[in-house]
Amino acid sequence: MLTPIDGRSVIVTGASKGIGKGIARVFASKGAKVLLAARDLAQAEAAAAEIGGEASAVAADVSSEEDCARMARTALERHGGIDVVCCNAGIFPAARLGTMTAADWDQVLDINLKGTFLTVNACLAALKARGKGRIIVTSSITGPITGYPGWSHYAASKAGQLGFVRTAAIELAPHNITVNAVLPGNLLTEGVEALGAGYIASMTSAIPLRRLGSVEDVAYAALFLASDEAGFISGQTIVVDGGQVLPESHLAL
Ligand code: NAP
């Protein structure tokens, strides 16, 4: 049994659906005050209303420094501080090399990687003021461990997040702030459902546990990293993928 996190102030970016909403739901169910951020305010508000408890929403595009500052201010105003920041917002449009444009590349890197930095930067003063804090980044197996055609920009952004995590962990350790990442495999989110039945079937057959993950599978890993008990873990990763990265070939399955 972990020390309860009730009353803690938690920001989750990209929380109007998918993994972010799952993280927000699990943290709120444990009594945390959760601020759900996404670009579409109506969708974020609907998610917060569905979650209930002390969940509320704010409109924020994590690739905008201004929006991230407003998001952090909103958490301070509503919750009186910030204890946990979940940098989860991300996009995964596909484009193969040869057709990928510089604009495609920039959009993915701006949201997934720069957005992680901007989110942390905006929340830093408030985290330091608490005397302890938790930063949890949603990376991916794609990039840090595996590759997938069409996602060279995405993979670069997700691997880049881990470089950020490792150095941020060192820089923020004197403030008793830990920085870690969860690396989801394939989860059944709205974003992945949009990739189609063929994608989902091929991924299911590549996963030793023979199912796509649920958002709760990732949310509970994030909850552990946010706990007091995980206070000596920093700069690390937890892979949540049903064993997908393990097989040396399809014969292993
Ligand atoms: P999703 O279902 O498409 O949801 C994405 C969320 O991020 C939405 O709430 C979206 O809301 C928000 N978002 C997108 N761009 C944003 C921006 N610029 N600023 C703020 N919020 C933004 O995605 P998901 O599958 O849950 O993925 C969430 C994270 O997990 C991503 O970082 C993704 O790379 C990672 N991941 C997912 C999987 C998977 O299998 N699903 C696997 C590995 C890693 P708005 O559009 O309204 O902003």
Image (cartoon, helix red, strand yellow):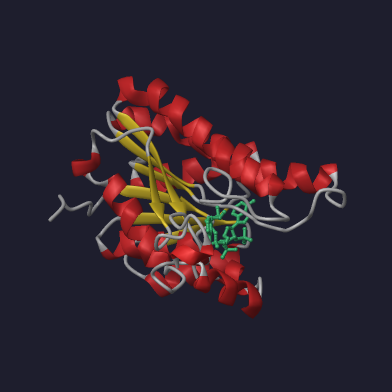
| Image quarter of the C terminus | bottom left
Residue in the image at 39% along x and 59% along y: 218
In percent of width and height, residue 232 lies at 23, 33
In percent of width and height, residue 213 lies at 43, 68
In percent of width and height, residue 185 lies at 48, 59
| Image quarter of the N terminus | bottom left
Residue in the image at 65% along x and 77% along y: 198
Q: In which quarter of the image is residue 171?
A: top left
- Give the vertical position of 86 relative to 207 (above or below): above
In the rendered image, is residue 55 in sight? no
Count of marks placed on residues? 0
- Give the vertical position of 36 relative to 81 (above or below): below
- Give the vertical position of 44 relative to 37 (above or below): below
In percent of width and height, residue 122 lies at 51, 34
- Residue farthest bottom in this picture: 197
In the rendered image, is residue 72 in sight? yes
Of residues 31 and 171, which is closer to you in this image?
A: 171
